[in-house]
Image (cartoon, rainbow, N blue to C red):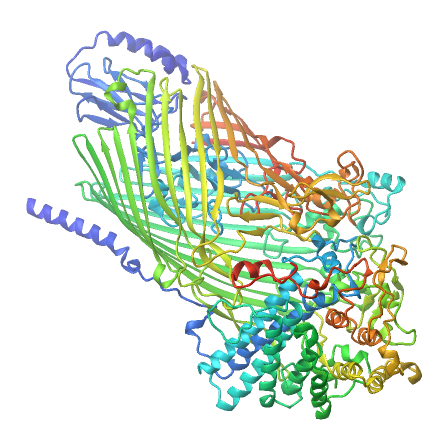
Amino acid sequence: MIKLLPKILWGPNCLTKRTLLSSLCFLIVQVALAQQEVSGTITDQQGIPISGATVMEKNTTNGVVSDFDGNYTMTTTKADAMLVFSYLGFKTTEIPANSSTVNVVLQEDLEQLSEVVVIGYGTQKRADVTSSVATVKSEDFVQGNVKDAAQLIQGKVAGLSVSAPSGDPTEGTQISLRGTSSILGGTNPLVLVDGVPGSLNTVAPEDIASIDVLKDGSATAIYGTRGTNGVIIITTKKGSNDMKSTIEYNGYMSISSIANRLNFLNADELRQKFDEGYTFNGANLEDFGSNTDWVDEITRDAYSQVHNLIFRGGNATSNMTASLNYRDLEGIFLKSNSEKYTARVSGNHAMFDNRLKANVGIILSEQMYNALGDGTSFNPYIYRQAVIRNPTEPVRDVDGNWYERDVYFYDNPVGYIEETIGENKLRNTRLDFSLSYDFGDHVTLKGLYTRKGESNIRGFYQTKNHVSTTKNGQEGYASRGTDDYVGNYGQFTLDYDNTFGKHKVTGLVGYNYEDNTNEGFYATNRRFPTDGFTYNNLGSGQGLQLGEAGMGSYKNSDKLIAFFSRVTYNYDDRYLLMASIRREGSSRFGEDNKWGNFPGISLGWRIDQESFAEDWDWLSNLKLRTGFGVTGINAGANYQALSGLTYGSYFLNNGQWVRELVPSRNANPDLRWEKKEEFNVGLDFGILDGRINGSIDYYNRTTKDALFNYSVPTPPYFFGTIAANVAEIKNTGLEFLLNVTPVQTENFNWTANLTYSTNTNEIVSLSNDAFQLTNDFFDQGYTGEPIQISTHRVQEGQPIGNFFGLKSVDITNDGIWIIERPDGSLVPATEATTDDRQVLGNGLPKAYYSWNNTLSYKNWDLMVNLRGALDYQILNFSRMFYENPTVSYNTLDSAYDLVYGKTELQDVQRFVSYYVEDGDFLKIDNITLGYTLPKDAIKFAETFRIYASGLNLATITDYKGIDPEVNREGLAPGNDERDKYPSITTFSLGINFTF
Amino acid sequence: MKNIRNKVATLKTKISILAVCALFVPIGCTDLEEEVFSEVTESSFVPSESDIVSVMASAYTPMRYVMGWQGWFDLQEEPADMFITPTRPNGWDDGGTYKRMHFHEWSSTQWQPRNTWINCFNGINSANRVILQIESEQLPVSAEQATSIISEMRALRALYYSMLVDSHGNVPIIASYGDDLPVQSSREEVYNFIVNELTEVIPSLTETVDTSTYGRMTKWAAYHVLARVYLNSEVYAGTTNWDKVIDACNEIIDSGAFQLSESYSDIFSTDNESNSELVFAIPYDQIFAGQWNAHMKMLLPDHRLVFGMQAQPWGGSSCNPQFIDSYSPTDKRLSDTWLMGDQLSASDGSVVMTLVKEMPSIYDCDFTDGFRCGKYEIEPGATGGLSVDFPFLRYTDVLMMKAEALLRTGSSDEAAAIVTQVRARSFDDLADATVTGAELEGDTTVQYGTLAEDGTIADAGDQATVPYGRFLDELGWEFAGEARRRTDLIRFGVYQTKSWYNHTPKGDYTTIFPIGLEELNTNSNLSQNPGY
């Protein structure tokens, strides 16, 4: 009783409670009856009542569940009964019922062994999990203005890299799990939203309760197709039965600014260069008399607001959740924004003694954003124009027109923005319907059907004052387009679970069907009589009659069908097994290769449960697990197995232009599943009552039959490439996760979470029996003009992401690069050939690390997340193009620095190793400070918290570009392109309250 | 009572199971057939009569790469002595691609030769496919039609091979559409294949020259190609065939189907499709067939204002001053071919810029350094795709081939008469146009040797007399910028021996290009050309 006291005092209203308690204590002494009525309140450490917690009388079946306010009342069968309090995510607590009032404060289970982990088509207790699965709950999410669901768990899961290289409010994050396993398949994981394939944007981040990440093949094999890059399972916030009705509000305002600016010459600096005797061509030909900060002209402090409301409630048999989300995001560039509404309703209904359960769910969203890129959001070419423009040019000339000059690829960025009108509108619908029936004898049958729809309509117009007219005479250019997607998803599962003494068994069989249909249409026109119509009256343009209009339409569809089964077996909570198999077919593959089998098996041994470990009091958890699984990657596009014909370009036949009919694709009837085999071994541990816990995982994944657009000889082939299963890729890595609670006192709590993961990648082979490369490489990536050369080489025996170019080691007195050839000899760049290229670095980090801290002191909470990546390089395009005094555009200040301390550069723009920089960084990524109002300070709300948060706050790095987190997708990772949307720093101020 | 309750319970269960199962009725299948909507798959396609032209068209359209980006024009002109693409303030180093072309230091990844390989074999592949479709009766054609289409396709295939035998020499001969990995042939075998094919199909080719055969392989186009390969047979196969050149040319001349165009510039006008010189043209059109962007590479961005264009050209290539200096001042082809000096605004006549002849160095030229090719009409409103039809085979070439064969077989005065006839339209005074046989036998008037930055000769290099060098000059002045200079320089031995601008000779092996890395990579039957 004494032990409990301080914890009760923790709550608000402590004075009154203490008085009450004293009198209760007095009562306890007198009570010693056989049957006893016990009541009390169950709360968590913050004093928030826990509803739905189970109270059992030990060694009996006598039990009750706490109500909305955490209150319970029960009658024990005997005197001095032991009460067992349990609730998901909290430590089970036993308290003797030696008083008629037993209040209890449940401690959060730091190790969460009892937590339920969402695995494919079901859930499992954390303690029973035998594969590599990570769970992040909403209280541990990154807070503030996050881009999508993935950013919520940025730096929280070992082996999952989440980056946000673009500040565009319509762009999401880049994710990769355990390296790049596929050449064409990308690194995007399968995202399931409440069990149905969706995207990281299907529901609002504020509406998410938890995110589970299935990492290894034995866990993802149940999802066969698309399981290769891992599975991210998003569980939305849900109501439960017998729940008090609540409204939860979460909202924030934020302000964003460019994370970092490149130092280009400003007007004064340019004039100084003129004074020093520099002469330039093109942009910086002369002083045009003005002082213009072009980047300033197109950027702004961007204000955003996000509001989220969740309504929840339920009675004994039905419950519902409804949520509304509004996100109004401004980008840092003018006319760059995103406005999105999302609504979600989910109703659960149970009948026949809770045996038949039904769920109906609807998700609707609508998004609008400015689309200066003719169908895409911001056109990053505008940003390039702002940095390379002569700072002495005015924005407008004396007549008020946009100031333009005839310089190659040189347009006024402000005019470009102001004279362009573009809007994209998107609508997303999803209808879920599921029914399940519990037969009561350990068997549950469940069916689910989802209809998904996605449509967009786009409009784009460049006025007659846009360079498309003032330079290129189009007299107004407009385009419109629309796409429509409809998908059906159905699933049917039969679950079995039973316990025979020490043997616990579960089984699952299921069927899965999915189809997707995409169609669309677009049209363009020019020569409009007026700007007044913008894109709303396409037919009024004369371009159609002059043959200058364009149009197109398309439609395609695909299907995926699967059968799957899984069994789990648990012997005495010591030995664990999970085995699954999925047989899946895709319409995209060749006639005889549509179906593939994807087995997975994993084993676990809970060492701490063994009798020999009984005395190891310091040990709270020790589990060894190992698994093997096979997953697949679907063909990236439809119809690749079929040969295609297309009506192509025109041919003059007897004075008339007719379309040619040409093959458009080589048929490959042998096209089949790309398969990844993964072996995983891991150790989960917990010591000192879970104050230190974590896991270590090692994986070894081999992708076989990797799809690749293989070069073939023409003839006999019609096309130079064919989609074929040729490559083999290997990834190995280690992942460490450590959760530590260094301080845990009444008022002060500090938990730290550390992750470290490594990845080693190798392309084992690019050939198979049917397709042989004479050379074992191909080049990827492209600098763009005027350098016009590839940036990366993909080669057998080498990792993906190798930069391949000339190695600069010195400079001649004339300012020409000196290149070191692969044989070590030196040659001026003017004499170097493409044969002198060599590997200059690699664009994929070899290791990622993070250190997340959560501190709480009384009502204050503070979250500090640090994150970084190690051992990789970045090709700095901005320097490669503009750190050069000879170019005909504005230059970086550093263009006039002495290269290698010797002389100014006088060479043409070249891709040399001088611009390949180390990218290693440490980011102070997210700091959030929150304050929860004391209970007695608020009458209207149950909880009320305010917080301030900063995202992408500081970066410690030697990299000279804007942000070392650049594109890491595809086969040319690490290229920090010129045309980009710089990353941003955001500060948010938010409130959460529930009433 | 209990019984009823049980029944109700059972009924409930049954309803529930039914309801759950009902969810799957519409989706419970395993059919994975691909449904195709906006594409045509080969297996499902049944061609109709109207598709015949469309199918044949696919064999012709690859020809349009000729004036396209890094196409046949670049392949023939960049390594020769007229067109130079130096580094300019807006770039044009382009990874050194144009310098490698100028220096003859290309590797197997050089794009200009690769584009030639890809496009010519694309055309050959398509021609073979049409032939297969006709022979296997997949196309609904009459027997007569079948013969004429097959002959036309074989002639077209020979035209592509006439380009490949010149560019890469040792290429695979592929005469049927199939799955076998092609086997490499020697340059001589390729030459013989072209000659045999053309000789065989010429009798069954059409003699009609009108709109219906424009841009198509007629009997005369086939003779023209035949004459061209005979003209270069010493280079291709080590034997001369001057008499056969004359015979083939005479067939065309005697047909009376073509005449010299009265105006030189009319041959290169936007509406040149009715020009009397065109034996085989590649039709281009701003709207329908816009691949011609060679003008974008040559003109300056500000030529937009000079010609009232809708596009802003890129400003790369200009003419080697040594070649400009070789023109006779009275030769109107100088100004008909090159844009020089002040460039006037189309709208107000003001001077937009002034082009100068001098080009200091391939590493560093200003925008306005070097005269630009303005031979092909830039009509007002022109875009990145020019509408001029490219005169790939023109009648003047027939006359000049005959003249060259006569010159080389001792009939120099007869040759001179033909050359004078050709020159006449480009000189105001016939006396200036007249040349003699002796003159044509003489040395070139181009001052070869590398240039210093000030435009003087830095290193004269090989100054040996070029046999019939003056005739080579005539070819240069007449056919400047017509994507053939490389072939002519090789035949006259200049390509392998002389220095010009920043170029010094690299050796005989450079007369054919290396086979592309990708091609070698994918076909183990191919071996690289000697010297690479």
Counting from the top left corner in percent of width and height, residue A236 is at: 40, 40
A123, A95: nearer the viewer: A123
Establish if B64 lies above or below A962.
Answer: below
Quadrant, the N terminus of chain A: top left
Q: Is residue A229 left or right of residue B275?
A: left
A127, B13: nearer the viewer: A127
Quadrant, the C terminus of chain A: top left
Establish if A52 lies above or below A395.
Answer: above
Counting from the top left corner in percent of width and height, residue B36 is at: 43, 67
Counting from the top left corner in percent of width and height, residue A477 is at: 67, 63
- What residue sits 36% from the left and 48% below the top? A224
| Number of marks drawn | 0
Please identify the quarter of the rendering in which residue A974 is found.
top right
On the question of residue A545 being in view, the answer is yes
Counting from the top left corner in percent of width and height, residue B149 is at: 55, 84
- What residue sits 76% from the left and 40% below the top? A811
A477, A360: nearer the viewer: A477
Establish if A292 lies above or below A554.
Answer: above
- What residue sits 80% from the left and 57% below the top? A406
On the question of residue A547 being in view, the answer is no
Q: Is residue A496 left or right of residue A482?
A: left
